[in-house]
Image (tube, rainbow, N blue to C red):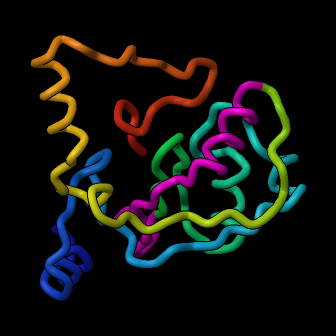
Amino acid sequence: MTKLVKKLKKKTNQRTCRVAGVTCVDATKDIILELLPKDINKAKRKSNSECSLAIACRRQLGHEARIHLTKVYISRNGGGKIELWDRYIVPLRLRTEIVAFDRGGEMQPGEYTLKAPIGFNRIGARNGRQEAYRKRKQNGKRNPHITITGVRLSALKHAP
């Protein structure tokens, strides 16, 4: 464990997880990203590290970013290598833009807010929806699972 991670755990008592061998923590503040037309023009479709939002993160924050459909990971660099990922939640409006862009449409320039996780979205939090799912499973009634196709890989399966 690096000094930065030890200091963070000691100071905040924050829960962590490992993403691609690097410690990941929940962000504490929202971030507003300004997406410009030049970011969109440089972007690659279906790429979590070269999409327009990742390019905007590098331009504005100076940090590496991985943009997935539901989560965003922004790095904290220490001595040139990634020491820690900050985890943000993608709002529904932005998720719609990502899906449209990955499927060949245009992403609209503007300001987008990446939300800091709260409540059941935090790392290690118990999810009330899991309890409801268990009850539905016992009753035999399940909602059909819908998979979005033609977009970038899931953060759950292919984290940064």
- Residue at (44, 71) in percent of width and height: 77
Corner quadrant of residue 63: bottom right
Give the camera-side residue of 80 and 11: 11
Q: Is residue 58 left or right of residue 133?
A: right
Residue 71: x and y in percent read: 46, 50
Q: How many marks?
A: 0
Q: Is residue 88 magenta?
A: yes
Quarter of the image that includes the N terminus: bottom left
Quadrant where the C terminus lies?
A: top left
The one nearer the camera, 85 or 111, is 111
Range of the magenta residues? 75-103
Work out whether residue 102 or residue 111 is closer to the camera in this orientation and state it: 111
The vertical placement of 117 against 66, above or below, is below
Residue 22 shown left or right of residue 30 in the figure: left
Name the residue rendered at 21%, 30% in the picture.
133
Q: Residue at x 84, y 57 (%)?
A: 109
Q: Is residue 13 above or below residue 37?
A: below
**Residue 144, picture quadrant:** top left
Q: Is residue 90 left or right of residue 77?
A: right
Residue 19's spot in the image, x, y percent?
30, 49
Q: Would you identify the image quadrant in which residue 37 lies?
A: bottom right
* Vertical position of residue 111 compared to residue 20: above or below: below
For image coordinates 16% across by 19% down, the residue present is 137
Most foreground residue, 132 or 12: 132
Q: Is residue 24 magenta?
A: no
| Image spot of residue 110 (x, y percent) | 81, 62
Is 151 on the left or on the right of 88, as rendered?
right
